[in-house]
Amino acid sequence: MTATIGQDTQQVGERLLTPGEVATLFRVDPKTVTRWATAGRIGSIRTPGGHRRFREAEVQSLLTELTTEPEHH
């Protein structure tokens, strides 16, 4: 999912992260984050200049999902 900033996709006050910031959180290379966005694994927004940005809430949710141990019954 890719949107452009300025459309009704951005909530007021929502923090947007750069690929480098997301990469630091996941401890991967920024190019990996870009590949994830291209593959649709993480949603991104395009700035008017064509740069990718990622919604902080979505990134935090994915990070929590991927780093939480599954419950064993």
Image (tube, rainbow, N blue to C red):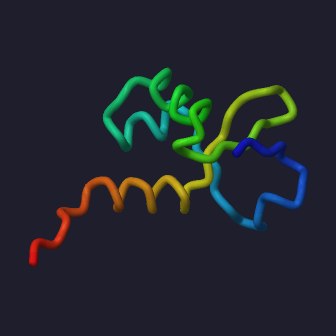
Position of residue 33 measured from the top left corner of the image (x, y, whole percent): 49, 32
Name which quarter of the figure residue 26 lies in: top left
Task: Identify the image quadrant of the N terminus.
Answer: top right
Query: Left or right: 1 with respect to 58?
Result: right
Q: Where is 70 relative to 63, above or below?
A: below
Task: Identify the image quadrant of the C terminus.
Answer: bottom left
Q: Where is 42 relative to 11, above or below?
A: above
Q: Residue furthest left?
A: 73
Query: Left or right: 36 with respect to 2?
Result: left
Give 61 or 39, whichever is nearer the viewer: 39
Name which quarter of the figure residue 50 lies in: top right
Position of residue 31 measured from the top left corner of the image (x, y, whole percent): 49, 21
Q: Residue furthest front?
A: 73
Position of residue 24 measured from the top left corner of the image (x, y, whole percent): 38, 36
Count up the numbered dots: 0
Residue drawn at x 49%, y 53% is 59
Q: Where is 27 relative to 16, above or below?
A: above
Query: Left or right: 41 with respect to 44?
Result: left
Q: Residue furthest bottom?
A: 73
Name which quarter of the figure residue 57 lies in: bottom right
Residue drawn at x 90%, y 53% is 7
Give 52 or 71, whichever is nearer the viewer: 71
Residue drawn at x 83%, y 27% is 49
Query: Left or right: 66 with respect to 10?
Result: left
Q: Where is 28 relative to 13, above or below?
A: above
Position of residue 68 measured from the top left corner of the image (x, y, whole percent): 24, 62
